[in-house]
Image (tube, rainbow, N blue to C red):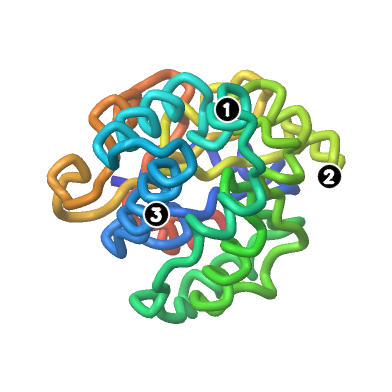
Amino acid sequence: MTLILPQSRFQQVETWVFDLDNTLYSADHDLWSQIDARMKAYIADFLGIAPDDAFKLQKDYYRRYGTSLRGLMIEHGMDPDAFLDHVHDIDLSGLSATPRLGAAIDALPGRKMVYTNGSERHARNVLEKLGIDDRFSAVHDIVAARFQPKPTDAAYRCFLDAHGVDPRRAAMFEDLSRNLEVPHRLGMATVLVVTQGTPAETRPGSREAWELEGRDAAHVDQVTDDLPAFLERLV
């Protein structure tokens, strides 16, 4: 499934930017269902509503605002810190070290960064379990983004400015097509990371159908279901 852009395009890249969840580890690990469930419970408790109503609100805000948290902050004045601590308190025991991925990332020339809509604490915990926590020069999280989430233009410009990234010399790896639209427009090479085997829409706790749209969109330069193999072909 991996198709490589002209080698010269990747030879220009000096900053490699990776989303975290379902990108640096396979969606088959299904950590997202844990986060999803903890969001629902927190929202239900915070607003004093039934879990089913909380779940509907959670998904509505996510679609409209980029993250459920952003919607809750705007619509209900929620303090984000307690929310982030709660939703990312999950079981990571299913993750294991990925030495092949670590070696492939090591071989890339230039800087490597993680850019996530989650918290830095969650990212650090996941990266440690994967055994690649020392590969990245920075983790840019939702707090660093001033709670402006991907896929907004403001979020990406905040990231680029904060780290002095030239988008024309950068590549972005993501599991959601819509999160690649702005990077592509700004000049970044874009790679959509999908999961091998079982279609994502049939897995328990998986993304909604609308989140999986855009795989063939013009703003997706490449699609791969094997991130280590893709990176190995670039060097």
Mark 2: which amino acid?
Answer: His
144 sits left or right of 103 in the view: right
Q: Position of residue 117 (x, y in %)?
A: 58, 43
Is tag 1's residue or tag 3's residue first in the polypeptide sequence?
3
Residue found 33% across the figure and 30% down from its top: 211
Query: Can you identify the residue that label 3 sits on?
Result: 38
Along the line of sight, the residue nearer the viewer: 143 or 7: 143
Residue found 54% across the figure and 54% down from its top: 234
Mark 1: which amino acid?
Answer: His
Q: CA distance from mark 1 to mark 2?
A: 31 Å
SS assignment at label 1:
helix
Q: Position of residue 193 (x, y in %)?
A: 40, 46
Disc number for residue 163: 2
Q: Position of residue 139 (x, y in %)?
A: 70, 56
The residue lying furthest to the front in this view is 48
Disc number for residue 152: none
SS assignment at label 3:
helix
Total labels: the figure holds 3
Could you classify mark 2 by the number of other residues whose Cα lies within 10 Å: few (under 14), some (14-19), or many (20 or more)? few
Q: CA distance from mark 3 to mark 2?
A: 32 Å
- Nearer the observer, disc 1 or disc 3? 1
SS assignment at label 2:
helix
Instruction: Decide: is 70 above or below 204.
Output: above
Q: Position of residue 7 (x, y in %)?
A: 56, 43
99 sits left or right of 184 in the view: left
Residue found 52% across the figure and 58% down from its top: 86
- Nearer the observer, disc 3 or disc 2? 3
Instruction: Decide: is 220 above or below 112.
Output: above
Query: Can you identify the residue that label 1 sits on?
Result: 76
Could you classify mark 1 by the number of other residues whose Cα lies within 10 Å: few (under 14), some (14-19), or many (20 or more)? few
**Quadrant of the rendering where the C terminus is positioned:** bottom right
